Amino acid sequence: MNKLLILFFLIISSCDTGKLNIITDLPKTLNEVSGTETTQQTNLIWMLNDSGNKARIYGINKKGNIEKELKINAKNHDWEDLASDHVGNIYIGDFGNNQNKRTNLTILKVNAEDLDKDSKIDIERISFKYPKQDKFPPKKKQMFFDCESFFYYNNSLHLFTKSRVRGNFGKTDLYKIPATPGHHVAEYINSFNSCDDSGCWITSADISDDGKHVVLLSPKAAIVFSNFTSDDFFTGEVKRYDFTFDSQKEGVCFTDNNTLLITDEKAHGAGGNLYSFSLN
């Protein structure tokens, strides 16, 4: 087999993303993309990078071009996800907590009217703590206080934790806090376990605009809940959509009630893309 033919097959295999349809590759600025969100007030797709990066959020178009770069007047301790409410305010989840020892867990609110600013943007600060945590860090078997996922629903912010307990990586606890500035104790609602290995880590979450579907993202799958009671989403019916493409998937949001946008980090020569994924 000649070298050109071998190269052709390598390219085809590297682009096999299963049912994840590539919309565009992301710019190098977003190689460590960790959160993705859309709002009803703009056609841009908002994204952020996680810890170690600048305190900025980016609005990109579906060609992968950055149209807005917002400088946020806060530190990126460990930004992990984005959410938005019905009027277009954006919330930044600064609650990454790999070692389970942070005492400054915060969600930053960016007001909708500031999304067109070129100057540094001041934020409103929503601080919280977990009711079950009294040691920082806790024992290794109790390290359930990392978080990479949340969304806004019914005037509250709903958080889904990421387990750091070996053999129990798929466990996620659902909490909620008021979407208002101040210091809050998160209210525990329920727990869910998808599977046990690190491919089951919950890395992002969103709720559809009609409020009828909730999605949790892991590197392996999109897990969708429907027909739930109130905001105990885990009481609903569960459907799992497995991915055949292995990458570090970190961001998910609904673009309509049946379609997801998914982003992954650029790592080991794979990923770094914006995808669409149909739930039909």
Image: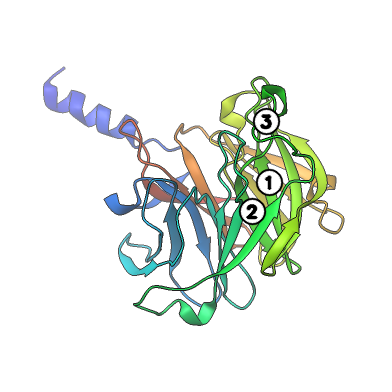
Q: Secondary structure at mark 3?
A: loop
Q: Residue at x 43, y 66 (%)?
A: 72
At which x and y percent is residue 20? 47, 44
Q: Residue at x 58, y 49 (%)?
A: 95
According to the image, label 1 marks what residue?
Answer: 160
**N-term mark: 2 or 3:** 3
Residue 143 image label: 3
At which x and y percent is residue 196? 67, 24
Q: Residue at x 38, y 63 (%)?
A: 62
Closer to the camera in the image, 80 or 264: 80
Determine if residue 256 is in view: yes
Structural crowding at the residue carrying mark 3, measured as other residues with C-alpha within 10 Å and reported as few (<14), some (14–19) or many (≥20): many
Q: CA distance from mark 1 to mark 2?
A: 6 Å
**N-term mark: 1 or 3:** 3
Determine if residue 207 is in view: no
What amino acid is labelled 2 in the image? Phe
Which residue, as the protein is rendered here, is positioned at the far top? 1
Q: Is residue 124 above or below residue 137?
A: below
What amino acid is labelled 1 in the image? Phe
Closer to the camera in the image, 219 or 132: 132
User: Count of labels shown?
Assistant: 3
According to the image, label 2 marks what residue?
Answer: 150
Colour scheme of the rendered structure: rainbow
Relative side of 187 to 9, left or right: right
Structural crowding at the residue carrying mark 2, measured as other residues with C-alpha within 10 Å and reported as few (<14), some (14–19) or many (≥20): many
At which x and y percent is residue 30? 35, 51
**N-term mark: 1 or 2:** 2
Q: Residue at x 54, y 51 (%)?
A: 252
